[in-house]
Amino acid sequence: MRDKILILGGTFEAAAEARRLTAAGAEVITSLAGRLADPPSLPGRVRVGGFGGTEGLQAFIRAEAITWVIDATHPFAAVISRHAQHACQAQGVPLVRLDRPPWAKHPGDRWHWADDAAMAARLTPHLGRRALLTVGAGTLGAFARAGGPFYLVRLVAPPGRLPFPHYQVVIGRGPFALADEIALMRDFRIDLLVSKASGGQATEAKIAAARTLKIPVLLLRRPAQGVAG
């Protein structure tokens, strides 16, 4: 009997893993959180939406006779990772965590660190006046409460009106080319990049672009996942 694998996805790495495993003959179900208005095309089955916590995920694993779970969610998706760990332990199903390698710091990088979004929001006005904000829609609230400089907000889907006094939105989904990132920062006169320390290759070009332009980078530290992988 071939493996039936549940991939907790929504990332560049999850899509690549779904294609690899499908080509190898596995039955693959990719689960997406449902935040994307235009989810990527993926092989195998795709389900969209939450599971309803640990119990809901456990029930799905049992009902679908899942033999493996691969947690390829975003490094900052700590809640679903905890749910996956507990559900797989309860069902006796192996869990593999695909951890993105962190970005390596190079000579010329000017990195600052924040423990959370609230801290990043407080630091931002002290580090730049025109910030490229690439932290995801769910993290913008902390920056709105702090006020701050002009924000160029990059998102994967168009938002409603954002609660910033001065901002502009650009829509894009990685991977991004280095030349395009440099052009974007130059066109908008960006003097600070604010990003989650997500790692991986799909969005690393913005880090290289900041290095090229000698722009400081404010990074939000990754949360503890609590999952070995």
Image (cartoon, rainbow, N blue to C red):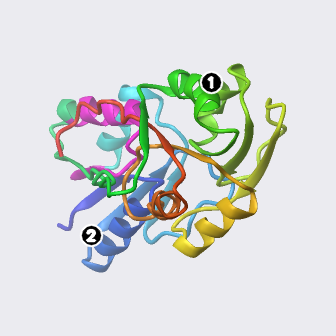
Q: Position of residue 27 (x, y in %)?
A: 32, 66
Q: Residue at x 70, y 39 (%)?
A: 129
On the question of residue 177 being in view, the answer is: no
Q: Is residue 68 magenta?
A: yes
The amino acid on which the numbered mark 1 sits, given as a three-letter code, is Ala
Say which amino acid is labelled 2: Ala
- The residue drawn where x is 17% and y is 67% is 1
Residue underneath mark 1: 142
Q: Secondary structure at mark 2?
A: loop
Left or right of 46, for residue 107: left
Residue 19 lies in the magenta stretch: no
Number of other residues with Cα within 10 Å of mark 2, as a class: few under 14, some 14 to 19, many 20 or more: some
Residue that carries the numbered disc 2 in the rendered image: 26
Q: Nearer the viewer, mark 1 or mark 2?
A: 1
Mark 1 falls on what kind of element?
helix
Residue range highlighted in magenta: 65-88
Residue 126 in sight here: yes
What residue is at 52 percent from the left and 71 percent from the top? 178
Q: Is residue 65 left or right of residue 184?
A: left
